[in-house]
Amino acid sequence: MSNPIKKLASQTVVYGLSSIVGRFLNYLLTPLWTGIFSTEQFGIITEMYAYVAFLVVFLTYGMETAYFKFSNRKKEEDPSIFSTIMISVGSTSLLFIILSSLFAQPLADWLLYPDHKEYITWFAIIVGVDAISSLPLAKLRQKNKSLKFAVVNLVNVGVNIGLNWFFLVY
């Protein structure tokens, strides 16, 4: 096996394994949630996470791919590429969080959760932070730092699980 193929295989294993382990660990939250939340509350959580999946893609608007394309074009690293993309995605994510928070009640009414406008604010923050955090992870992938990427990803999952336990159990 040639060196580039070995490198690709090892990175694929690290990226894939960290993703699978992360998803499995997040899946373990389901028994916690179903034990704490009513069927109606769990349905709301499921619906909101369906929106999250769409909104993260919307808020990153292909900038991860653009970062890969433009950073790989040059022989030397150009920090302006990453900073421009961070400013762009960071600004639109911040605007999204602000507008979602300002219009939380009308959005909650529209989604048929009139007594829970805080859900809108919480999920806007989750989506905005997730969109912004996707770019440093893309930078790690572009720099071929697969182990660091996996560690950051798994730490993120650990923090998520820890905060769920902290806020829901304690």
Image (spheres, grey):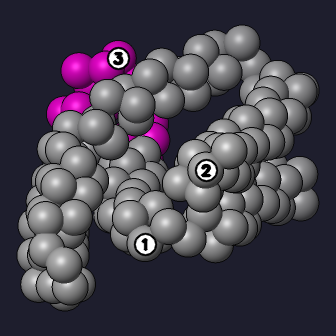
Three-letter amino acid code at the position of disc 1 = Lys
Badge 3: few (under 14), some or many (20 or more) residues near its Cα, within 10 Å? Answer: few
Q: Residue at x 16, y 44 (%)?
A: 61
Q: Mainly helix, strand or loop, the magenta region?
A: helix
Checking the image for residue 52, the label placed there is none
What is the number of callouts on the image? Answer: 3
Q: Is residue 121 above or below residue 33?
A: below
- The answer for how far apart the CA atoms under marks 1 and 3 are is 44 Å
Question: Which contiguous range is marked in magenta?
Answer: 105-120
Of residues 128 and 149, the one nearer the viewer is 149
| Residue topped by disc 2 | 2
Element under disc 3 = loop
| Residue topped by disc 3 | 112
Of residues 95 and 64, the one nearer the viewer is 64
Q: Residue at x 22, y 64 (%)?
A: 72
Badge 1: few (under 14), some or many (20 or more) residues near its Cα, within 10 Å? Answer: few
**Screen quadrant of the C terminus:** bottom right
Residue 108's x, y, as percent?
A: 31, 31
